[in-house]
Image (spheres, grey):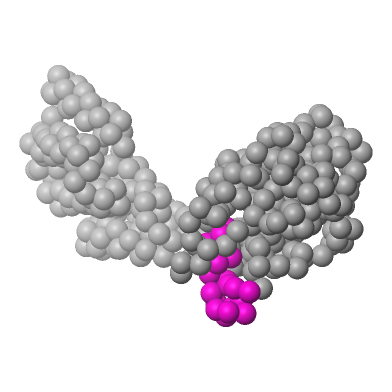
Amino acid sequence: MLAILALAWVSSGTAWGLIEARGESSPVLRAVFGLNILFHPATFFVVWRRLLPMRVVDMACLLFAAGLCAICMALRLYVPALGGEIDIQPLYLWIPVIYVFAFTLTGHRSSLRLSLAIMALFVAISLPYLLQRPVAPHANFTFQLHMVSAILIAALHFFSSYQHRLQAAQLTVDELAHLANTDTLTGLANRRRVNEVIASELLRARRCGHAFSVILVDIDHFKGVNDRHGHAVGDAVLAALASRAKETLRDVDMLGRWGGEEFIVVLPETDFAQALDKAHALCAHVACRPLAGGHSVSVSCGVTSVQPGDSADALLQRADRALYAAKDRGRSRAEGAACAEPPPSLSPAAPASAAPAPRSAGRPSGPPA
């Protein structure tokens, strides 16, 4: 906007200088160019200092152009002594541009009303001239101006309506896509969306050899929270846990709700050791301070990384076994399954108990709290 205003100021000054040099100026033209020379730097200062909203500035520029054209039209048609030096054809060429600006700067419905109001102003100015002098030199050109203006406004309204409907349809599609891929309680990606991301990461791993890891996260003793405090508190804890967990993740990591009190983290470009460190940090960060309403909870994590030939089910089953091992070995900890074998304990102090049989990878909820 600042560049446009600066260019308009330079153009107005240059045109004024050329007209004066040719001796084609007049008091009216000097007044018109003088207004431009004052208006453009004043508007430049307002925009530069952000004294007014841009919507107000845009409207002021539009009304300034329309008012200037209306005054020049009235002087040229009715006061030849003052407006005789105004070339009416270039003036009339600028008027359709005003309608284009009106549809560009305002909303769908208000643009039509504003354009019709500006056209009504020009028609009201020229109508007495057309009625009294239908064969006058400028009558035919003025009548054609109004016909072209009416057609232009209709065309602009048609395209504006089409754009408005297209934007509304696009918004509806985006909203439906968001609802289809988002868990309504936590605002995280839902199970469907997480499965899509895992499938995409598996494809990248097969094609390019990129590593990625998965962490299954389950809230310890979550059933007790619901039983003691009610499901409303349980829902608040789930939402607060989602926010807390995201604090430990990168922007490229995906945290989703897997089902019930169980969450899942997909870590692109992350090997097993890095994912295990991330899971330990997540457990510590959740337990470091209470969540919503002063309720303290802990989480257990099962960690695994993609292996050659992995399917989504195999990957999730390993993470599921590791999560079961973390539950069995004391909770509030992370266990890992680096390969298809049952995961060993990752803590030297932990008993070397065997991990229970894996849960079904399709089960949405976590292990018994």
Dominant secondary structure (helix, strand or loop) of the stretch shown in magenta: helix
The foreground one among 120 and 26 is: 120
Residue 120, given in percent of the width and then of the height, sits at 29, 63
The foreground one among 179 and 285 is: 285
Location of residue 310 (image quadrant): top right
Residue 229, given in percent of the width and then of the height, sits at 55, 79
Residue 17, given in percent of the width and then of the height, sits at 16, 22
Note whether residue 197 is visible: no
The foreground one among 369 and 98 is: 369
Q: Is residue 31 magenta?
A: no
Q: Is residue 239 magenta?
A: yes
Q: In the picture shown, does residue 89 fall above or below 194?
A: above
Quick check: 85 left or right of 100? Answer: left
Residue 78, given in percent of the width and then of the height, sits at 15, 52
The residue under the point 22% across, 59% down is 125
Location of residue 210 (image quadrant): top right
Note whether residue 260 is visible: yes
The residue under the point 67% across, 51% down is 333
Quick check: 214 left or right of 231? Answer: right
The residue under the point 90% across, 43% down is 340
The residue under the point 68% across, 57% down is 331
| Label tally | 0
Q: Magenta segment range?
A: 224-242
Location of residue 162 (image quadrant): bottom right
- The quadrant in which the C terminus is found is bottom right
Quick check: 274 left or right of 281? Answer: right
